[in-house]
Amino acid sequence: MALDVRQEDQVKGLVERTVKEMGRLDVMVNNAGASFRAKVEDISANGWNTVVGINLNGTFFGCKWAGKQMMDQPAGGSIINISSIAGVYGSTMMSHYGASKAAVINFTRALGMAWGRKGVRVNCIAPGPVETEGYLGVLTKQDPAAAKKAYDTVASRVGMGRWGKVEEIAYPCIFLASAASSFMTGETIVIDGGAAPQLGDG
């Protein structure tokens, strides 16, 4: 079901449809994200608001409506928000992205405390550089030599010497969605391969 996470009515509709078709909502992963590289002084109000609208407002709407449903059902549920190491360390070339992702971490902590006794756990994952289709797609549009240099430069800053794979973020999501993490809420797990702080600028 495709939707715009910036539109609250669409996010609400997603939750309602899930409950109608499946009977309940056990897990919500707020993973929609967007960004572009620019110096702070070159970011327009529209550019800032667009990134914040997707990354932060979208997470807010997802948590709000998933949380309402989960608090109303006997089994509760687990919400997983996806932040970024840019939200942990900051990012000079993606300050709008870093600020929105830092807010997601803070919001996660607040909800973990607010909903902990209501059967709803809310946790967060802050990935480092990951080989997503979107990011690799951006690289492939560049000159091949420049794209390889950019890819290798990022990898060289990671303790493990490589980018992460999508499944290396998905597996921790499974952990947070399951009873294996039943005493965790409000927490943020950084999964960055031992990345250096300057990777927040990636």
Image (cartoon, rainbow, N blue to C red):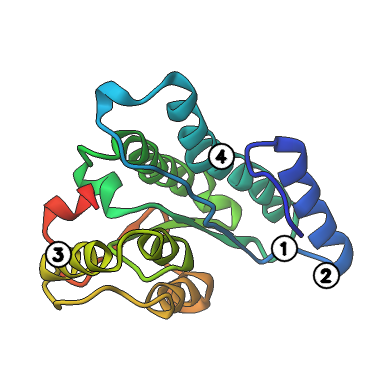
Q: Considering only order in the chain, which callout, 3 or 4, is on the residue closer to the N terminus?
A: 4
Q: Residue at x 44, y 56 (%)?
A: 82
Q: Is mark 4 on a helix, strand or loop?
A: helix
Q: Considering only order in the chain, which callout, 3 or 2, is on the residue closer to the N terminus?
A: 2
- Residues tagged 4 and 3 counted as in contact (Cβ below 8 A): no
Asked which quadrant contains residue 76, the reply is bottom right
> How far separated are the C-alphas under marks 4 and 3?
34 Å
Q: What element carries label 1?
A: loop
> How far separated are the C-alphas under marks 2 and 1?
8 Å
Residue 16 vs residue 8: left or right?
right
Mark 1 surroundings within 10 Å by alpha-carbon count, few (fewer than 14), some (14 through 19), many (20 or more): many
Q: Is mark 3 on a helix, strand or loop?
A: helix
Q: Of the numbered discs in the image, which one, if any, rests on residue 153?
A: 3
Between disc 1 and disc 4, the foreground one is: 4
Q: Residue at x 38, y 37 (%)?
A: 103
Provide residue 109's location: percent of width, then percent of height: 39, 45
- Amino acid type assigned to the residue bearing label 2 in the image: Met
- Amino acid type assigned to the residue bearing label 1 in the image: Leu
> How far separated are the C-alphas under marks 1 and 4?
17 Å
Q: Considering only order in the chain, which callout, 3 or 1, is on the residue closer to the N terminus?
A: 1
Q: Is mark 2 on a helix, strand or loop?
A: helix
Q: Of the numbered discs in the image, which one, if any, rests on residue 13?
A: none
Hey, which residue is sitting farthest right in the picture?
20
- Residues tagged 2 and 1 counted as in contact (Cβ below 8 A): yes
73 up-or-down from 172: above or below: above
Provide the residue designation for mark 2: 22
Q: Which residue is drawn at 63% across and 37% down?
A: 6
Provide residue 141's location: percent of width, then percent of height: 41, 60
Mark 3 surroundings within 10 Å by alpha-carbon count, few (fewer than 14), some (14 through 19), many (20 or more): some
- Amino acid type assigned to the residue bearing label 3 in the image: Thr
Provide the residue designation for mark 4: 60
Provide the residue designation for mark 1: 25
